[in-house]
Amino acid sequence: MNDKHLENKGLTRRHFLKVGATGVALAGLGALPVAAADAPTPAPAPLKLPRRRYGRTGMEISAIVGASDWSADVIPMAVESGVNYWHKAHRWTTETMPDAIKSQPREAYHLEVVVDRVGGDNKTGHIDEEQHYQFVKKAVARSGVGYYDVFKFHFGYHSVEEAKTNLGVIRAYDRLKKEGLVKHLAISQHHYKDINGDMAFDIVAYLMDHSPFEAAQFFHTYGDNQEITDVIHLAKEKDFGVIAMKTMGGVGRAATDKKFQALLADPKYAGSSPATAMVKWLMSNPSLTAAVIATKNFDQLQENVKAAQESTMGYNDRENLKLLAGFNKGMTCLLCAQCVSHCPEHIAIADILRYERYALDYQELSRARAEYKTLTKDGTACIACGDCMPACRADINIIAKLKEVHNLLG
């Protein structure tokens, strides 16, 4: 973050260092300048995020989940706004963990450690009890946090059958819990139809009743398939926590599209934005615990916190989402993965279009290209049969889209 941005908030980098994290957070949230040292102006109480019960964990977590890859400049403001759950917190060490977090009592915030398959990626790797156990033990020692509140299996099981028969993750969790190094068990679940596995909602529905998992995280955005909505409501009935991820489909590219922005000048869209409307839509679902929302700067965080606090959707919010849905039609993948099971080449279409989202919506082109290079089959494997296209809820010309994404990321 540069000085110019801080000056727009009535701050400079010198002021940031002088008043400290809390002062900056208050000024940023209230959109008020920091007063001179000899004439301090009391800042209004900052907006606070609502909190919801994270299923069987019993934890009350912020409706917006923080992430360890957020800017160090944004995190103090996030803490002041009430963010108390941190995704992939194992990436922090004793030296890099933000002061705004570790200066609080340990029980005031919740940290998550995620374990990945070993010996390959999320599709080719395998579950290994001992390596998962050792990974978390080392992370606890390296971070100095004492324990992680949530032990999360990253990317999840390939199928219901694997969840039934491969208990390595659960055994690693049990050992760590007995040693007081973790408290709760959760999963970040993807779809795996491209490797003849199952859909995320089927796997999560099984875990609710047949495992010690207490919560799950999976893809969810406006226009999603009904099965995802159903499993979110089922989770609420069964006191199973749910965090939505990859939530802002198309929002980033719409923000840079001149035609779309021109349409937003219509008065019926005034007072809202696609991003604000999306956050309100997520928060208006009482069955959803929280959401992971890509946050790059003060302005985005302030907008998201305000929308989460209001939560109730108005006419202008609904119109913004309709406009975004129309913009996304034929262009932006909803990551439902329904197309994948129809592909005779077993191309990971949804993964490829997720990487496109990293590039175009999150402006993370390097990350997108790195992820794309790991694919066993990329977009060039498409034989243009068209079998996948009738299954696409977003009416995307998948044949053309795969070529387009390969030119972008290949």
Image (tube, rainbow, N blue to C red):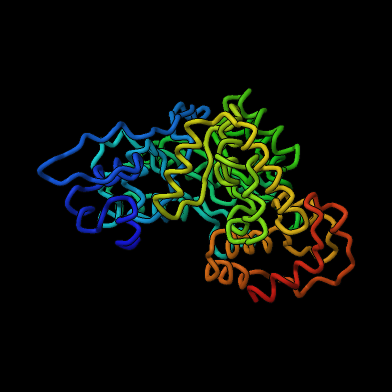
Q: 142 or 270, which is in the foreground?
A: 270
- The residue drawn where x is 54% and y is 31% is 311
From the viewer's perspective, is 225 left or right of 354? right
- The residue drawn where x is 37% and y is 36% is 82
Counting labels gives 0
- The residue drawn where x is 70% and y is 35% is 229
Q: Residue furthest left?
A: 38
- Which quadrant of the rendered structure holds the N terminus? bottom left
- Residue 255 lies in what quarter of the image? bottom right
From the viewer's perspective, is 391 left or right of 234? right
Above or below — where is 63 with respect to 390? above
Above or below — where is 366 with respect to 218? below
- The residue drawn where x is 50% and y is 45% is 152
Above or below — where is 275 with respect to 373? above
Q: 363 or 345, which is in the foreground?
A: 363
Above or below — where is 366 with respect to 264? below
Q: 390 or 381, which is in the foreground?
A: 390
- Which quadrant of the rendered structure holds the C terminus? bottom right
> Would residue 125 be visible to someone looking at this image?
no
Q: 156 or 110, which is in the foreground?
A: 110
- Find residue 404 and report its horizontal and vertical position in percent: 72, 71
> Would residue 277 be visible to someone looking at this image?
yes
- Find residue 392 and report its horizontal and vertical position in percent: 81, 53
